[in-house]
Amino acid sequence: MPELRQRMMNRPFCQASENNKAPILAQLQRVFADRTRVLEIGSGTGQHAAHFAAGLPHLQWQPSDLPEQLPGIRAWAAAVAAANLFDPMALDVAAADWGVSGFDAAFTANTLHILSWARVEALFAGLAARIAVSGLLVVYGPFNYCGAYTSAGNARFDRWLRAGDTGQGIRDFEAVAELAAAQGFALREDNAMPANNRLLVWHRH
């Protein structure tokens, strides 16, 4: 079993990240072809950071997450030994000072439905201050459209999230797009992805 093998190697493992890393990378190889320095928000287990840095060797990939996640991210980084994968940094999106700036792209996966709406607002405000003009923001995850779920599976997932924390839940695309626009991000792409997810690309102007 893959999960058992990863645990034996002392690396955190998420099956969803394992499933979606290849289709996401295929998109990022196109979208980030002319980028140089990417900030990943909410790197989680570190599986994405390791896979994407190895698959995008022209980029400097900066993972970040809450402090308790960093050892797992470092374990994945050590496994791939990619020179362009930087040491993960502790980051709370609600903090006034993130300690970094000057990125020409940012990426975040499966975070908006976990963060409270106030922290989603803080995320976009923080990125607007740290991504250069003409920079790109890529967001992956499930979204509702016109207030409706895109699948029965997403509806079940949303009920599960809200049962555990009423501040969590699948976000409405229109609300997120409005928030992004208010922070100077113009929507460039809305890509359908496997398992009823989307990959949204914004351009900072």
Image (spheres, grey):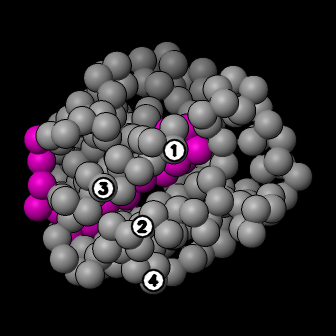
Expressed as whole percent of the image width and height from the top left, the position of residue 139 reads 47, 61
Expressed as whole percent of the image width and height from the top left, the position of residue 121 reads 41, 51
Give me the disc on residue 117. 1
Q: From where the camera sits, is residue 58 visible?
A: no
Q: Magenta span covers which residues?
A: 99-115
User: Type of residue at label 1?
Assistant: Trp
Numbered disc 2: secondary structure: helix
Measure how far apart labels 4 and 3 are at the Cα level.
Answer: 19 Å
- 134 to 72, vertically: above or below: below
Seen at 36% across and 74% down, the residue is: 185
Expressed as whole percent of the image width and height from the top left, the position of residue 38 reads 24, 60
The answer to whether the residues at label 1 and label 2 have Cβ atoms under 8 Å apart is: no
Binning the other alpha carbons within 10 Å of mark 2 as few (below 14), some (14 to 19) or many (20 upward) gives: many
Measure how far apart labels 1 and 4 are at the Cα level.
Answer: 23 Å
Seen at 26% across and 52% down, the residue is: 126
Expressed as whole percent of the image width and height from the top left, the position of residue 160 reads 77, 32
**Of labels 1 and 4, the one closer to you:** 1
Binning the other alpha carbons within 10 Å of mark 3 as few (below 14), some (14 to 19) or many (20 upward) gives: some
Numbered disc 4: secondary structure: strand
The answer to whether the residues at label 4 and label 2 have Cβ atoms under 8 Å apart is: no
Determine which residue is flagged by label 3: 125
